[in-house]
Image: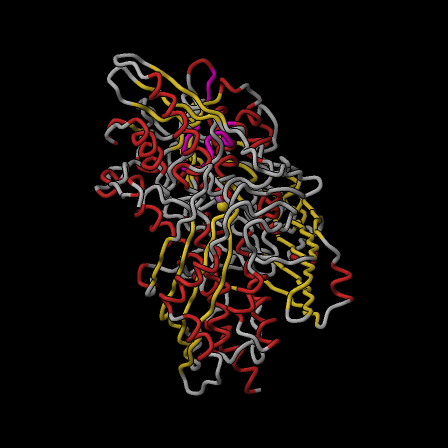
């Protein structure tokens, strides 16, 4: 293991362990000692309705009612298409859509005012079903070869449909933002967020002011997992408009119910796959991918792109045609969640491959293995896998840990009795970094180092620590290059008044992209280092020369410079009386390149694996026939807890990426992506294999097991 891999104590460890870290809800006065007004939202009770009139009760002194008419700038939140309003327009488009905010000193009084606001609605018919989306926010199509020919010449054609449900990020700290008007007309907005510059752009637009008049800071953030990629921009605009009107600090923090009901989740998906097989080999795949975007388009464009790029999994298929649609329904807008569109399509493709293998009478591991892509192969978007694909060696690693191949064959045999076993396998990649030409054309990251006279060095970048450890790993890289003790290098939470835009904290990009800029900056600083002087160096992103440029209009080229890889196996014992499956073992081999801190990376791998298992098994969330999310508490929305951690064994496989710091690739999202299909294959095996029970949706709960087994009896 390289020196850089050795684990250190995380920079934020002590204050967090001691309970000293101050989150947004943890103080009653601003840093300047001012009183903070409590802001709360009036949420739409209808999935679709016209707002005819709003009657606000008399407001006591010091209380404010804020709606779209108070927005000095544009009532569109700067995201991708900018169709998301800050406060609703003439209609509401989903249950929970913010109509207005009430702000004032006393929370109970704010609640009372909210409850007395009378809104007259004309109810309209909502569309809730992904199959009947009212419009396509985004639509893409791409492919290579000739799928029609592949189907004409096929020995066999398989057609299946897969469904995946919502998944909520369930960070420990709910969404929350605060705005404080400062002197000279500057609005200071801060809170729990991933992307300080996204919020910056959004607040500028809502207030109609230039960049210098908005100042964003990331407070200590209790988890994000993607959920705080876009949503803080929306609440950020709302509190900024409220603070402007009240001319006082306004803070809005969601309670857990609001957070579960009204904030972005993983897109539910519907995938229709048609696959051609000739001489035992997959020769063609036609994949139709539909994501339920919800009422506004928010991040769906990019989520869908990542999803469809992964549509054919880790397989070398000659003829491919993929279409992707993000459809509008009158439901909560969906957004980013670790994996960002890929967990949905990988579940579909992995399960499809397993079903085909079983139909052909071949072990699915061997079938998949025969189709693995190799270095130099073409990607789904006619790019290239430029670097070694270590899947076979990673499979060997998992086989060794789990006794996978033997058990996989053994459990395929007919089983009787109450308890039956299965072991599932899956292999995935995660495209490292922002999708497509994003880094090159939109983000254009800049990172800086500032050395002070006392010899300490500050990292200046905009990537927030959301638990993934960048406050530690960024300084670690810089200290390593400068030969300084880690205490001499530090990285504060991003503050747009002080740091350049090194891009959003998303897409498993921070360490790989910005970490590399910092490594180069540190080398530069080392060469010009002068004692007792303040010095600053800066680095800019440059697309690696080897990349085949990606063009979104043709959906062609290298969607990512490189890929992180994962192989996982999940072994279950299924109780056929209760439907409960006990996970006997969960095994993962992950290639994220060089781990720039072994413990941090292992924490990521284990946590992500668990979220993947939750997604596949217990995390059920749905809306009722009016469009209201029913699972709005931890009683109704179950996530794996510490008690549910199975015998989880994780190994790292290191395939170094030359353009990442010390060979590091993106790591954060990968571990969630592989487990769902492995879990489903395991359950299916325990139930007798796909010839008896062809499973095609997640989450697949104990109830679903019983329902499926009952089919056998009836
Ligand atoms: Mo992330 S799921 O790309 O915020």
How many numbered circles does the render carry? 0
Q: Quadrant of residue 354?
A: bottom right
Q: Quadrant of residue 467?
A: top left
Q: Magenta region: which residues?
A: 185-200
Q: Residue at x 47, y 49 (%)?
A: 564
Residue at 56%, 27% (x, y): give it: 206
Where is residue 513 drawn, in percent x and y?
46, 35
Q: Quadrant of the C terminus?
A: bottom right
Name the colouring of the figure.
secondary structure
In front: 652, or 337? 652
Tell me which residue sits at (40%, 29%) in the image: 518
Q: Is residue 330 left or right of residue 512?
A: right
Residue 86 seen in this snapshot: no
Compare residues 227 and 94 and report the one nearer the observer: 227
Q: Is residue 290 above or below residue 305?
A: below
Establish if 103 lies above or below 150.
above
83 versus 327 height, above or below: above
Q: Is residue 92 visible?
A: yes
User: Within the image, what quadrant is residue 646 found in?
Assistant: bottom left
Front-lying residue, 582 or 396: 396
Residue 144, horizontal then vertical, whole percent:
71, 52
The location of residue 682, given as percent across then percent down, is: 46, 71
- Residue at 42 percent across and 80 percent down: it is 420
Asked whether residue 258 is drawn in magenta, I would say no
Q: Is residue 533 above or below residue 397?
A: above
């Amino acid at each position: 293991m390289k020196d850089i891999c050795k684990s250190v104590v995380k920079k934020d460890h002590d204050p967090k362990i001691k309970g000293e870290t101050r989150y947004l809800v943890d103080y009653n006065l601003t840093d300047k000692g001012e009183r903070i007004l409590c802001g709360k939202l009036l949420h739409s009770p209808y999935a679709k309705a016209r707002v005819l009139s709003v009657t606000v009760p008399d407001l006591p002194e010091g209380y404010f009612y804020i709606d779209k008419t108070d927005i000095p700038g544009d009532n569109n939140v700067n995201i991708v298409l900018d169709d998301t309003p800050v406060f609703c327009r003439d209609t509401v488009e989903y249950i929970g859509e913010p109509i207005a905010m009430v702000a004032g000193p006393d929370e109970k009084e704010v609640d009372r005012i909210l409850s007395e606001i009378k809104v007259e609605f004309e109810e309209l018919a909502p569309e809730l079903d992904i199959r009947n989306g009212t419009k396509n926010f985004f639509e893409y199509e791409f492919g290579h070869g000739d799928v029609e020919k592949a189907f004409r010449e096929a020995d066999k054609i398989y057609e299946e449909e897969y469904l995946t449900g919502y998944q909520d990020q369930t960070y420990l700290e709910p969404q929350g933002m605060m705005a404080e008007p400062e002197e000279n007309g500057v609005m200071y907005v801060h809170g729990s967020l991933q992307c300080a510059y996204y919020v910056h752009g959004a607040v500028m637009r809502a207030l109609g002011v230039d960049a210098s008049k908005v100042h964003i800071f990331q407070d200590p953030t209790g988890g994000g997992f993607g959920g705080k990629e876009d949503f803080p921009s929306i609440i950020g605009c709302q509190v900024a408009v409220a603070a402007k009107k009240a001319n006082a600090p306004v803070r809005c923090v969601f309670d857990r119910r609001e957070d579960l009901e009204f904030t972005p989740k993983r897109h539910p998906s519907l995938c229709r796959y048609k696959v051609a097989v000739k001489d035992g080999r997959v020769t063609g795949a036609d994949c139709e991918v539909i994501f339920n975007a919800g009422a506004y388009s928010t991040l769906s464009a990019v989520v869908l792109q990542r999803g469809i790029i992964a549509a054919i999994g880790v397989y070398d298929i000659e003829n491919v045609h993929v279409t992707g649609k993000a459809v509008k329904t009158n439901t909560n807008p969906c957004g980013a969640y670790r994996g960002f569109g890929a967990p949905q399509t990988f579940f579909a493709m992995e399960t499809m491959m397993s079903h085909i293998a079983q139909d052909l009478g071949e072990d699915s591991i061997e079938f998949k293995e025969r189709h693995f892509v190799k270095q130099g192969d073409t990607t789904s978007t006619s790019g290239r896998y430029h670097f070694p694909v270590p899947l076979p060696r990673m499979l060997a690693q998992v086989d060794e840990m789990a006794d996978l191949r033997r058990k996989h064959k053994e459990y395929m045999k007919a089983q009787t009795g109450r308890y039956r076993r299965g072991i599932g396998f899956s292999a995935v990649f995660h495209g490292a970094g922002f999708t497509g030409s994003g880094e090159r054309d939109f983000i254009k990251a800049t990172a800086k180092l500032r050395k002070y006279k006392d010899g300490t060095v500050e990292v200046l970048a905009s990537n927030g620590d959301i638990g993934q450890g960048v406050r530690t790993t960024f300084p670690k890289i810089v200290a390593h290059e400068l030969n300084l003790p880690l205490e001499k290098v530090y990285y504060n939470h991003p503050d747009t008044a002080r740091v350049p835009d090194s891009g959003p904290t998303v897409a498993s990009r921070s360490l790989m992209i910005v970490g590399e800029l910092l490594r180069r900056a540190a080398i530069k600083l080392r060469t010009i280092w002068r004692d007792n002087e303040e010095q600053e160096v800066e680095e800019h992103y440059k697309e690696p020369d080897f990349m085949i440029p990606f063009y979104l209009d043709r959906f062609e080229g290298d969607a990512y410079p490189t890929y992180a890889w994962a192989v996982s196996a999940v072994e279950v014992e299924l109780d056929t009386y209760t439907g409960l499956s006990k996970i006997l073992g969960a095994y993962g081999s992950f290639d994220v390149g060089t781990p720039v801190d072994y413990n941090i990376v292992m924490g990521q791998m284990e946590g992500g694996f668990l979220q993947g298992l939750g997604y596949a098994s217990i995390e059920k969330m749905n809306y009722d026939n009016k469009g209201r999310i029913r699972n709005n508490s931890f009683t109704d929305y179950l996530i794996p807890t510490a008690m549910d951690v199975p015998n989880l064994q994780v190994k790292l496989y290191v395939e170094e990426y030359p353009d990442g710091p010390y060979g590091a690739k993106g790591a954060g999202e990968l571990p969630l992506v592989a487990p769902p299909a492995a879990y489903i294959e395991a359950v299916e095996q325990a139930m007798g294999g796909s010839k008896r029970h062809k499973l095609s949706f997640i989450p697949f709960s104990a109830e679903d097991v019983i329902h499926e087994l009952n089919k056998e009896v009836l």
